[in-house]
C-alpha cells in the first residue's frame, strides 16, 4: 500500500502487529513477503471454514497462489470454488493480489 494511502493513527494509539508487519515489509522492499502475510491473514475467511481445514497455502509467485489440498476429492471441490475464493481474497486484501489458484495434493501441517 503506498504511503499516501496508509491510515495515520493518532500519536500514542496502539496498533496491531498484524497490521504493522505488511507496512514494515513494504518499507524495506520486501513487498512479496508483505503480500504473503496479507494473504495468510485472510486465507481461512476466503476459503470458508469447511474448506480451510483441507487446504493450506504454500506461496505466491507472480500472482499465482500455490496451495496443498488433503486429497483429490478436496482438490476438485476447491477447484470448483476457485472464482469465489479468488474474489473473496481480493475483497479482503483490497487489491487483485492473486489472479490464479493452483492446487496439488500433499500433506498439510497441523495448526
Image (cartoon, helix red, strand yellow):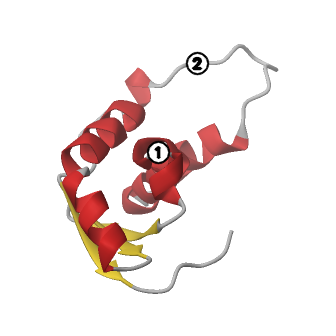
Residue occupying image coordinates x 53% and y 79%: 108
Total numbered badges shown on the rendered structure: 2
Residue occupying image coordinates x 41% and y 34%: 92
> In the picture, residue 100 is in which quadrant?
bottom left
Q: Residue 48 shows which numbered tag? A: 1
> In the picture, residue 89 is in which quadrant?
top left
State the image coordinates of residue 34 (x, y, percent, origin top left).
46, 54
Q: Quadrant location of the N terminus?
A: top left
Position of 94 with respect to 98 (left or right) is right
Q: Of the residues under marks 2 and 1, which one precedes in the sequence? A: 2
Residue 61 seen by the camera: yes
- The secondary element bearing badge 2 is classed as loop
State the image coordinates of residue 7 (x, y, percent, origin top left).
53, 20
Q: Nearer the viewer, residue 60 or 110?
A: 110
Mark 2–mark 1 distance (CA, rounded to whole Å):
31 Å
Image marks 2 and 1: residues in contact by CB distance under 8 Å: no
Residue occupying image coordinates x 71% and y 13%: 10
Q: Residue 8 shows which numbered tag? A: 2
Position of 60 with respect to 62 (left or right) is right
Q: Residue furthest bottom?
A: 106
Q: Nearer the viewer, residue 86 or 74?
A: 74
Q: Residue 84 shows which numbered tag? A: none
State the image coordinates of residue 107 (x, y, percent, origin top left).
50, 86
111 versus 14 height, above or below: below
State the image coordinates of residue 101 (x, y, percent, origin top left).
23, 61
- The secondary element bearing badge 1 is classed as loop
Mark 2 neighbour density, 10 Å: few (under 14) some (14–19) many (20 or more): few
Residue 64 seen by the camera: no
Position of 55 with respect to 24 (left or right) is left
Amino acid at each position: 500500500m503506498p504511503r499516501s494511502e496508509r491510515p495515520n493513527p493518532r500519536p500514542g494509539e496502539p496498533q496491531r502487529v498484524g497490521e504493522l508487519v505488511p507496512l514494515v515489509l513494504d518499507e524495506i522492499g520486501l513487498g512479496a513477503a508483505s503480500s504473503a502475510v496479507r494473504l495468510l491473514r485472510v486465507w481461512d475467511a476466503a476459503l470458508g471454514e469447511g474448506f480451510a481445514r483441507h487446504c493450506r497455502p504454500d506461496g505466491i509467485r507472480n500472482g499465482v497462489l500455490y496451495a496443498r489440498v488433503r486429497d483429490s476429492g478436496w482438490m476438485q471441490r476447491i477447484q470448483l470454488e476457485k472464482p469465489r475464493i479468488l474474489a473473496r481474497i481480493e475483497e479482503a486484501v483490497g487489491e487483485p493480489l492473486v489472479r490464479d489458484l493452483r492446487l496439488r495434493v500433499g500433506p498439510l501441517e497441523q495448526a
